[in-house]
Image: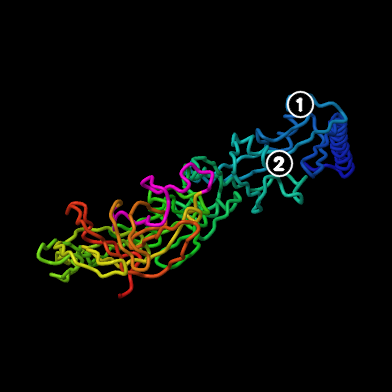
């Protein structure tokens, strides 16, 4: 069917009007929908995201915005909170942190990853349920420290935290005390240095300082002390960790042989500052021969005249041999001990034979002949009452040993040579009676008595004649003392 031109034009205008009406209605509806939305500002970390929405709660708005949240993220206000204009939603996303725990024998090494809003490493570890022990070391983003590096403050949590667990090291000292050191050092020596314990090269550490540090390890530290050692002619001052004298000698390679000894004893404990003396003891033997003096023996001979003697045997000394043990300490003699004695030769006495035969002879004197039985060479002196050395007030002044009054004709003698009561003749003096003694009248000495008024001083050797009668043989001193020694007549 064909429409006239005017009809077709009228129809097109109608269609256009209809579509325009629909478009206006749609635009009105869209404008009404847009007008009914509310604006919500989302603050996502450092970003600002404004959106318009018809949603009524925070959670619906975030889902509509396509924001997926983690449980650790912080949202304010809460997800169930209704939206009230002007609405602002603040979101802080939790960031991942890797935590490495290095065990050191206390616990196995492990990795932990968590999301957190905290920036302080210790708070992050507490959030992860990780407790730091004594001596543990933190590494935060490659830097050692127990706190977050200052340049990262306010920039969120660190990316990596490494916890190096410390291992306990029990150090035992010589006095019995113990010290516990917590350390992350790789070796025992490094752990002690970190704790301020410095070792001298002569100190002894068991086990050694290069031993790897492990949990629960115990070490013994022996400090070196100065000791003065005197041994084998040398004196040296050393530093040693030996606890006893025996250990010190073993350390120095000093051996004790035989009777060698050490001061103080091998069991003595060393405190430091002592002097240890090694005494080398040696022994040797010496043979010593000692003469044994012979004795002089006198034998009487009735066929030999009085005051004559003959040597029958000259005598010979004996020999006593001794074996002597000599003890030396450090080369110096300290003791001698006689081990045994042997008589090599016995002494032989010197034998003198003296005469006991008495021969009476006659001597012509100015006063006539006299008979005598013995002649003795003697030193003659003289004295009187006043020169006898007795005070006049003494009761025995002027009296002799026998009680007779002191006068001419009394002589003082040594009774070992001339017995009291015997008569003697002294040339130049006359006959005298042996009736007195004196402190200085000893041996072959005779003191001739005088009266004070006729005292004659004597001092010369003379022959003294012992007058008959001959006394009994038992009273005769056959061998006379030789002091003073008489000169040859």
Q: Which residues are magenta?
A: 391-419
**Is residue 401 something one can see in this rendering?**
yes
Q: Is residue 313 left or right of residue 184?
A: left
**Position of 121 relative to 456 (above/below):** above
Please tell me which residue is depicted at 29% across the width and 69% down the height of the picture: 365
> Does the magenta portion include 405?
yes
Quadrant of image for the C terminus: bottom left
Q: Is residue 295 left or right of residue 464?
A: left
Mark on residue 57? 1
Labels 2, 1: front one: 2
**Position of 395 relative to 454 (above/below):** above
Give the image location of residue 147, x and y in percent. Answer: 70, 45
Give the image location of residue 30, x and y in percent. Answer: 84, 34
Depth check: 198 or 366 in front?
A: 366
First in residue order: circle 2 vs circle 1: 1
To which residue does mark 2 refer?
A: 120
Quadrant of image for the N terminus: top right
């Amino acid at each position: 069917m064909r429409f006239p031109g005017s009809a077709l034009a009228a129809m097109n205008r109608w269609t256009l009007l209809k579509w325009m009406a629909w478009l206006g209605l749609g635009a009105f509806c869209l404008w009404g929908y847009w007008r009914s939305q509310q604006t919500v500002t989302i603050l996502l970390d450092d970003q600002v995201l404004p959106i318009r929405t018809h949603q009524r709660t925070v959670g619906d708005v975030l889902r509509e915005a396509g924001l997926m949240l983690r449980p650790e993220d912080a949202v304010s206000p809460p997800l169930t909170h209704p939206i009230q204009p002007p609405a602002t939603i603040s979101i802080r996303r939790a960031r991942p942190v890797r935590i490495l725990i290095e065990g050191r024998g206390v616990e196995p090494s492990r990795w932990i990853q968590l999301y957190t809003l905290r920036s302080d490493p210790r708070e992050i570890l507490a959030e992860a349920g990780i407790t730091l022990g004594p001596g543990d070391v933190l590494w935060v983003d490659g830097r050692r420290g127990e706190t977050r590096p200052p340049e990262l403050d306010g920039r969120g949590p660190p990316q990596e935290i490494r916890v190096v667990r410390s291992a306990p090291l029990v150090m035992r000292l010589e006095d019995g005390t113990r010290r516990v050191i917590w350390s992350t050092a790789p070796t025992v020596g490094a752990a002690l240095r970190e704790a301020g314990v410095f070792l001298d090269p002569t100190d002894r550490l068991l086990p050694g300082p290069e031993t790897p540090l492990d949990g629960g390890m115990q070490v013994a530290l022996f400090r070196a002390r100065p000791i003065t050692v005197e041994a084998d002619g040398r004196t040296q001052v050393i530093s040693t960790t030996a606890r006893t004298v025996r250990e010190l000698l073993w350390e120095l390679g000093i051996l004790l042989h035989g009777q060698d000894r050490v001061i103080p004893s091998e069991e003595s404990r060393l405190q430091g500052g002592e002097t240890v003396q090694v005494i080398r003891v040696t022994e040797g033997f010496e043979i010593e021969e000692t003469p044994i003096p012979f004795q002089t023996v006198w034998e009487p001979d009735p066929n030999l005249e009085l005051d004559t003697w003959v040597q029958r045997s000259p005598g010979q000394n004996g020999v006593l041999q001794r074996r002597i043990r000599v003890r030396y300490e450090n080369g110096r003699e300290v003791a001698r001990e006689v081990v045994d004695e042997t008589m090599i030769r016995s002494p032989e006495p010197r034998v003198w034979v003296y005469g006991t035969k008495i021969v009476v002879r006659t001597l012509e004197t100015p006063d006539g002949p006299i008979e005598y039985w013995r002649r003795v060479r003697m030193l003659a002196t003289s004295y009187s009452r006043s020169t006898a050395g007795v005070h006049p007030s003494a009761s025995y002044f002027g009296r002799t040993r026998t009680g007779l009054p002191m006068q001419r004709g009394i002589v003082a003698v040594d009774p070992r040579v001339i017995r009291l009561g015997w008569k003697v003749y002294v040339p130049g003096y006359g006959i005298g009676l042996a009736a007195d003694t004196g402190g200085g009248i000893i041996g072959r000495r005779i003191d001739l008595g005088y009266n004070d008024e006729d005292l004659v001083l004597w001092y010369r050797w003379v022959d003294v004649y012992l007058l008959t009668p001959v006394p009994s043989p038992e009273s005769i001193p056959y061998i006379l003392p030789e002091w003073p020694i008489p000169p040859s007549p």
